[in-house]
Each structure stands twice: as structure tokens, then as C-alpha cells.
Image (tube, rainbow, N blue to C red):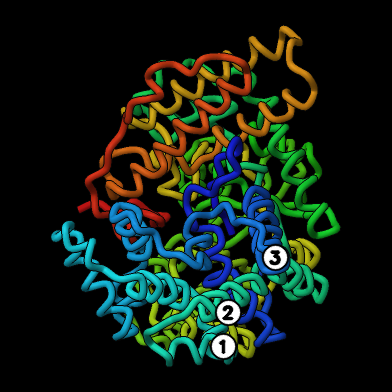
Amino acid sequence: MHQPEYRDLQSGEFKLPWTYLHVIKDYVDMAAHLEAVPQAKAVVNFAPILLEQIEEYARQVNGYLHDRISITDPLLAALVDPSIPADPEERMRLVKDCMRANRERQINRYPAFKRLIEMADWLEHHYDSLNYVNSQFISDVLAWYHLTWMGETIKLTDTRIKRLIEKGSGYTLHDRIEIIEVIAEQLTSIICRYKALARKGQVELSVTPYAHPIMPLLLDLNSTREAMPDAPLPELDVYPGGEERVRWHIEKGVHTFKRLFGFKPKGCWPSEGSISDQTLRILSGFGFDWTASGGSVLQNSLNLAENDNASGIHHPFKLHETDIVCFFRDDGLSDLIGFEYSKWHADDAVGDLIQHLENIAEHEPDDKVVSIIMDGENAWEYFPANGYHFLSALYQRLSGHPRIELTTFSECLENKAEIKPLAKIVAGSWVYGTFSTWIGDADKNRGWDMLGDVKCVFDKVISTGQLKDEQVQQAEFQLAICEGSDWFWWFGDYNPGEAVSNFEKQFRLNLANLYKLLGEEPPAYLALSFTQGSGAPAMGGAMRPGIELYN
């Protein structure tokens, strides 16, 4: 589970709503599916920066319900605002915010919401007509948007949500407050639900470095070329103090995890499965038992002469002179779930996946570990009913299968799964086995140069000792946010224009905020957009396959 830091840390305002929306839709459903099948097991990973945002949302929403304290997420605040904005531009902004959902699976599923969005489409092209849009239209759009984003398990079990969906229109302030009460319950309980699943042994919880940085690139930008020898790199030769920053993210991530779950995790999913020799040595030094990456990283590594005796993707491996075991994603099976099975009938999709697993069991020697590693949030909106039928059938049929055992990575190690040796790893991520999603493109490289600029200023100011301890801590946190992977993910023409605009604005804001915390004037270039998107990638660009497909 992962979302980047969507807050402006200086104002406290959430700039995008994806954290709370994915909590009420995806993180709740994923927990409920496991709770419904006690024999099922899974590894669930949390990025610490996500955990802290969930904690902050829960605090704010409960503060609103108990004491009417303002909420700093504009969309959530609008849901419970007694007055609808009079300004046409503000109204249109609210309406457009409530159009950010999957048309086929979320919006068109509900005829009443579909009609509202069709009206909103018309309003986008007849802007002057906004003056004639009444408050009830805005109220209904806000209510329906949040009802649509509710997880399927909530829609099936919560009588309030069932009643409000059946109502269809004419939503009152009381109705909207009722919706936020449901949202508050989910935000308040979600971390505890996963903690309870871990306590039962049904789930193994693992951690990602604090703000989700691509560790191999912080350590060595040239590691890009291990899998992409001809990739253009930023003007920045090396990220200053990269190893120190990697260690900071790991230490802070483990600290946050322990504070919220009460124990130290045994496993670390490195951001985007990004690993290198140096990354694995550092993770090993922190005492993690296991980590994981993409199958393409393993395939690239097996092609090295140094690894001539290693073979097979369905085994954990251990890099020479480290104590950490690395599991590798079966990219083919994982991508079937992420990109294909949403188009299938759920029973057929589950049957196909099980047949693939049975074929592995039949044609490969015993003691195979098949690692299916998925986003916890982005695939399910493309499935009917948020993947409810697929996931229900998947857990039920796998947990009762005579030859397939659901397990966790730590249990694999406890049960003495065969671990194969590797002399060297080719640095890469679970996306194509390369770092091409984050570096090697002109706009992505420009982002690295901008990050390098502010890091040099950070080092210079910190070295003077002019900042107080509290200011240093604020600057360190702000720097960590700037180092997150998500900004670079979205830079470039490949991605949709609106997503690129949202994330590059946030990146520039994050950098500007850091300069200000350091007492420095932000460079003029931070006032200018530096990347635009015009693409229409699969699944809106929020997901990537593990294997690069060539036409």
C-alpha cells in the first residue's frame, strides 16, 4: 500500500484526495477479503508516509465530527460544507474533482451518478451555464462521488451506505455528514484491522523506506545504466550524500512502522522493488530477513556470467556476502491480474490463474515459491465491483487447494525454502527491470537536476549550523518528501496531462517549500512548469506491467 505525501507541509492542506479515497475503497476491501477467509494468507506492505497520512486524516475527520474543526482536504471539506460555493469557477472545480473516477466501472455503474456526470461533461463546454446550476446539483455530485468510491464490502454491509445509494438524489447536509461518519470509521479502524490480521498470523506486514525513494538512484545515478546502458542521465553526476539519505529513510520508516504496529518488520519492500548490490547490502545491514523485487531484475541478473550456475525464478535468492534473502515477482502472473483479468468473468480469471500455478507445480521441482506482487490500490477500479468477485473467489479457492499453499515470505524462510546464490544483481525495479520510469527521459532528468540543486543548498545551510534543531528536522522531512519516487513516475509525455500537471506542481511546491525552510529564495525556474503529458497509457498510467511489451 503506497501513496505519496499529498500535503503541503507548510500549510497543512492536502492537495490531492487519493489517500483517503483509496482507504475507503481499496485498503478496506483488501482487509475484508482476508478477514472473510481465515485460511488465506498474504504479505501486506505499507509505506510509512501513507500511514502518517491515514493517521492525520483520521485525526482531522474525527476532529470535525466531534468539535467541528476544519478539515484541510478541500474535497472532504466540501462534502460537509453547509454552503455550496457561489463562484462559478469554484463550482466547476468541485464538479471536475468529482469526475476523477473510472467511467465504466465506477460512474456508469450508477445511472443517477452517470446522469450527473453527463451534465458535468456538458457544463465543461458551456461554461456560462454554471450560473444556472443550483446547489442541489453540486451537493448530489459530492455525495455520489464519495458513495462511488466506497469499497464494495462497505456497500454490501453498511445500511447507511445502502440507503444513500438507493436514495439516488436530493442529498441533504445530513446525508453528507452521514457519509463522512462512515469515512471516519474506516480511517480510524483500518490500521488496527491490519494489525489484528498480523497478530493472527494471517498477514505479514512489511515496510518501505519512509517517503518511498528509489534507493539505488540516491546511492548511484549511474546504476541506471546497468540495465539501460545507453540511457541519457541528468547533468547531476551524483546525488549528494545519497547513502546517508537512504539510511535516514530506512531508519525513519522502521520507526514509524513500529510506532503504529508495535513491532519491527522482518521484511522490506524497497520502493518500486528497486534494488542494486549496494541497496541489498544496506538492507542486510539493517537486519531485514527478506526483501523483494521484479522478475525482470532476476532475469537480467541471471544473464550475467558471474551468475552462470543460478537459474529459475520461483526461488528466493541471496546475494553474495549479504544476509538478506530476495524474492522475485512472477511478472507474468502478476500482470495478468493487473492488466487482463479485469476483462474476464471472475470465475474464469481465478480458474486461469490456478491453472498456471498448477502447471508450475507439475512441471517444476518441489519447493517452489511463486511471488505474486501487486499494488494494493490501483488494479481494482478496473474490475467489476472493485474486484470483489475476483478476490473473494481467489482467496477461497486458493486457501482450499490441495497442492497450493498460501503463505508469507517469513514463513517460507522458516520452512527452509531453498535459497539460491547470486554473485551480482543488475540494478533495476519491478517495472521492466529498469529505472526507466524514474530517470533517463529529458523531463525526469530535469527533475533530478532540480532535486540535486536543492540538496546542495540543504547541505550548505545545514553545515553552517544556523538552523535550530526543530528547523533542521522540518527541513529533513521536507527533503524526504522531495526525494519520493512518485514525482518522477509522472514526469513525461507518456502520462495523462492532468496527472502530470498535478504531480509536477506538487513537486515544484515541495522544492520551493524546502528552499524557504532553509531561509533561501527559491530559484525562478520553480515558477515554471517543466513537463507536460499527452499520453493515454493503460490503466491511466497509475500502473505499469513488470515486462516491457514491444510492438
In terms of sequence position, does the residue under pointer 3 or pointer 1 come before the other? Answer: 3
Residue sitting at x 31%, y 49%: 498
Splitting the image into 4 quarters, where does residue 92 fall?
bottom left
Q: Which residue is mark 3?
A: 62
Residue 45 visible in the shown view: no
Q: Which residue is mark 2?
A: 178
298 horizontally vs 405: left or right = left
Q: CA distance from mark 1 to mark 2?
A: 8 Å
Residue sitting at x 38%, y 44%: 502
Does residue 409 lie above or below 289 as drawn?
A: below
Nearest to viewer (mark 1 / mark 2): 2
Label 3: which secondary element: helix
In terms of sequence position, does the residue under pointer 1 or pointer 2 come before the other? Answer: 1
Q: Which mark is residue 433?
A: none
Residue in the foreground of this view, choosing between 34 and 144 = 144
Label 2: which secondary element: helix
The amino acid beneath tag 2 is Glu
The amino acid beneath tag 1 is Arg
Q: Residues within 10 Å of mark 3 (few under 14, many from 20)?
A: many
Does residue 453 lie above or below 116 as drawn?
A: above
Residue sitting at x 55%, y 46%: 13
Q: Are marks 1 and 2 in contact (CB under 8 Å)?
A: yes
415 horizontally vs 538: left or right = right
